[in-house]
Image (tube, rainbow, N blue to C red):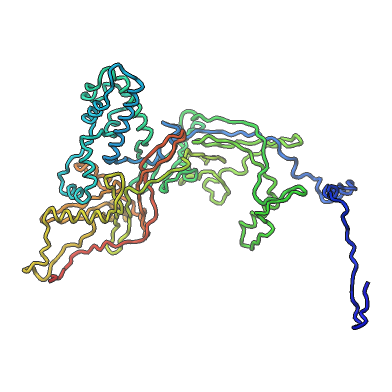
């Protein structure tokens, strides 16, 4: 009630407030939320339509049937190898140091086998070391070609290592080449067989077989899946199902990582048999799908404060945010998760699921949609898309392909790297060898190696520039300017007579040494297809569309990973990345140079 202030005649308002005062410590009765009129609560639920039961009962059991088909590229040969070391390997150029280390590994295995065998005749490690050094020694031939001699002189580390190991170390790579699968004593060189002590033959063969198995498991064999013209890996994995062969193709593998999204559905052809397809039926208890911040359906159950869906602010154009918010707030508790393991290297197709709820009702759940196929407007998830048009049969229904890709792959430093760049001034494409093998198991700068090679060649032939001589003419004509040794030209040529389509052909810059003219050849294996046999070379082409204005960089390095059985595997693979733009070689023709005093 108000009071009157006699000094100012203003009312002084003081209000009394009634509030509850707790006289008990326990609050169990309040938190229990007891209902004194349950019939009123049921009536309100009936009025709000909560007894219609559109959502039926909760799922308690789910019986699923799926067909699982193994993929041939995963099960052929060694199933534990993995996909990357099966697809990517190229030939490995083992330097002398690596060959010597492999040879020491074999000698250590031989000593261990002798210790386990405990032969009657004593085992002499020095004798067998000398025997294998004599029969399987590291060879290092002195080059006769002036260019090869100049290359060794430009960087003598590899030459010194080769000379130090030649005839003094066992070549582990050569030894492995003498041991075919299932070899016998008759497959060994005669000198090696004659030198083995007869009482030692059993454990020597045991050590050789153990070394062959270890080497074959460590280094993946080379495959022929690299497309030189496309600068990418291309391969197929066949799947036989229902008397038909379906090809799962990969046409643009360049980043060193393979997963299901790298595959496409290829053509379908008739085949014999079913390909080992099996139908797997099992019953599983489904679990509600949960995510951070989802609304809780029960009283007094606090929600996760890390995600506050109530503070989402979405404009009319934020369709994705609106859909996610609607799903989380309205339908987030309507989803269930059914754990289902799938074998690695298989293609699984879900044929259907029977869901049993708490009331005993069984509902057949079919796949939500068929495969989208060539209809890019249809919604589809995890299914492989057909490659091209004109397939022999309709695309697969809803399916999931789980390739045998390795989890983690470690990449070593680049052994070789080539940058394909466009030179608009010269109207050609150049392949710049940025890194080249150094002969010691690593790489070195290609520009510096080319500069040193050119200097050594000039010293070898006694090259003298006469432009500065006293009696030299004032002007000098040059047919063309020089280009660094690590710049390999690719010139445009027609794909076929009478067509305007072109492709890029590897060419060669001339190297003028005194009165001789030679061709500049590439150093890296990326640019040497067709030059392996000097007596029978053939041209090398790259598709013109593969080299964009930004350029492309192809690099090769050793890759290391663990197989599915835990063993280590090493292979030589390549990766392709975008370049850094165009380049200019400085190539000019018909030059008139003024004499410099």
Count the marks. Answer: 0
User: Could you tell me which residue is drawn at 28 percent across and 22 percent down?
Assistant: 123
249 left or right of 371? left
Q: Considering only vertical position in the picture, is 553 above or below 357?
A: below
Percent x, y of residue 86: 40, 37
The residue lying furthest to the top in this view is 120
Q: Considering only vertical position in the picture, is 354 above or below 146?
A: above
Q: Quadrant of the N terminus?
A: bottom right
451 left or right of 558? left
User: Could you tell me which residue is drawn at 23 percent across and 33 percent down?
Assistant: 137
- Which residue is more in the foreground, 520 or 281? 520
Percent x, y of residue 514: 11, 56
- Which residue is more in the foreground, 65 or 197? 197
Q: Quadrant of residue 100?
A: top left
**In this rendering, does residue 390 appear at all?**
no
Q: Quadrant of residue 160?
A: top left
**In this rendering, does residue 148 appear at all?**
yes
231 left or right of 356? left
User: Could you tell me which residue is drawn at 77 percent across and 49 percent down?
Assistant: 300
- Which residue is more in the foreground, 98 or 453? 98
Percent x, y of residue 308: 67, 56
Q: Considering only vertical position in the picture, is 194 above or below 137?
A: above
The residue lying furthest to the bottom in this view is 8
User: Could you tell me which residue is drawn at 69 percent across and 58 percent down?
Assistant: 310
Q: Quadrant of the C terminus?
A: bottom left
Percent x, y of residue 342: 55, 35
């Amino acid at each position: 009630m108000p009071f009157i202030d006699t000094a100012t005649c203003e009312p002084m308002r003081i209000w009394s407030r009634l509030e509850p005062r707790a006289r008990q410590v326990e609050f169990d009765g309040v938190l229990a939320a007891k209902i004194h009129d349950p019939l009123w609560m049921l009536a309100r639920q009936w009025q709000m339509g909560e007894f219609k039961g559109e959502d039926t009962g909760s799922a308690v059991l789910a019986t699923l049937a799926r067909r699982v088909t193994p993929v041939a590229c995963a099960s052929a040969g060694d199933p534990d190898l993995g996909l990357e070391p099966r697809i990517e390997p190229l030939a490995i150029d083992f330097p002398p140091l690596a060959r010597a280390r492999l040879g020491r590994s074999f000698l250590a295995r031989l000593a261990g086998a002798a210790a386990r065998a405990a032969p009657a005749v004593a085992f002499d490690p020095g004798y067998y070391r000398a025997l294998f050094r004599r029969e399987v020694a590291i060879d290092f031939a002195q080059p006769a070609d002036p260019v090869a001699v100049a290359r060794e002189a430009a960087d003598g580390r590899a030459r010194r290592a080769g000379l130090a190991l030649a005839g003094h170390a066992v070549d582990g790579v050569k030894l492995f080449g003498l041991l075919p699968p299932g070899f016998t004593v008759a497959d060994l060189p005669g000198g090696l067989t004659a030198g083995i002590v007869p009482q030692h033959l059993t454990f020597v063969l045991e050590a050789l077989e153990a070394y062959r198995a270890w080497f074959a498991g460590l280094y993946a064999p080379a495959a022929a899946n690299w497309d030189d013209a496309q600068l990418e890996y291309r391969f197929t994995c066949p799947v036989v199902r229902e008397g038909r062969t379906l090809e799962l193709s990969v046409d643009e593998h360049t980043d060193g990582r393979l997963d299901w999204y790298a595959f496409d559905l290829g053509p379908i052809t008739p085949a014999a048999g079913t390909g080992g397809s099996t139908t797997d039926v099992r019953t599983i208890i489904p679990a509600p799908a949960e995510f951070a911040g989802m609304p809780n359906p029960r009283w007094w159950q606090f929600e996760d404060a890390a995600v506050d869906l109530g503070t989402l602010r979405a404009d009319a154009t934020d369709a994705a945010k609106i859909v996610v918010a609607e799903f989380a707030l309205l339908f987030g508790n309507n989803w269930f998760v059914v754990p289902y393991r799938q074998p690695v290297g298989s293609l699984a197709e879900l044929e259907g699921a029977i869901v049993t709820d708490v009331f005993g009702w069984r509902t057949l759940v079919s796949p939500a949609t068929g495969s989208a196929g060539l209809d890019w407007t249809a919604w589809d998830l995890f299914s492989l898309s057909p490659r091209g048009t004109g397939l022999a049969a309709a695309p697969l229904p809803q399916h999931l392909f789980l390739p045998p890709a390795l989890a983690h792959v470690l990449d070593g430093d680049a052994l070789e790297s080539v940058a394909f760049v466009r030179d608009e001034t010269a109207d050609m494409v150049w392949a710049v060898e940025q890194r080249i093998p150094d002969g010691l198991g690593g790489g070195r700068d290609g520009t510096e190696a080319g500069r040193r090679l050119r200097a050594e060649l000039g010293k070898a032939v006694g090259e003298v520039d006469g432009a500065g001589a006293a009696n030299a003419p004032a002007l000098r004509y040059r047919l063309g300017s020089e280009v660094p040794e690590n710049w390999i030209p690719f010139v445009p040529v027609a794909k076929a007579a009478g067509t305007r389509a072109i492709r890029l052909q590897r060419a060669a810059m001339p190297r003028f040494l005194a009165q001789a003219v030679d061709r500049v050849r590439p150093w890296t294996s990326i640019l040497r297809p067709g030059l392996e046999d000097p007596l029978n070379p053939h041209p090398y082409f790259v598709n013109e569309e593969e080299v964009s204005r930004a350029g492309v960089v192809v690099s090769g390095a050793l890759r290391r990973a663990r197989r599915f059985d835990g063993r280590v595997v090493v292979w030589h693979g390549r990766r392709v990345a975008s370049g850094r733009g165009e380049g200019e070689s400085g190539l000019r023709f018909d030059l008139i140079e003024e004499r410099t005093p």
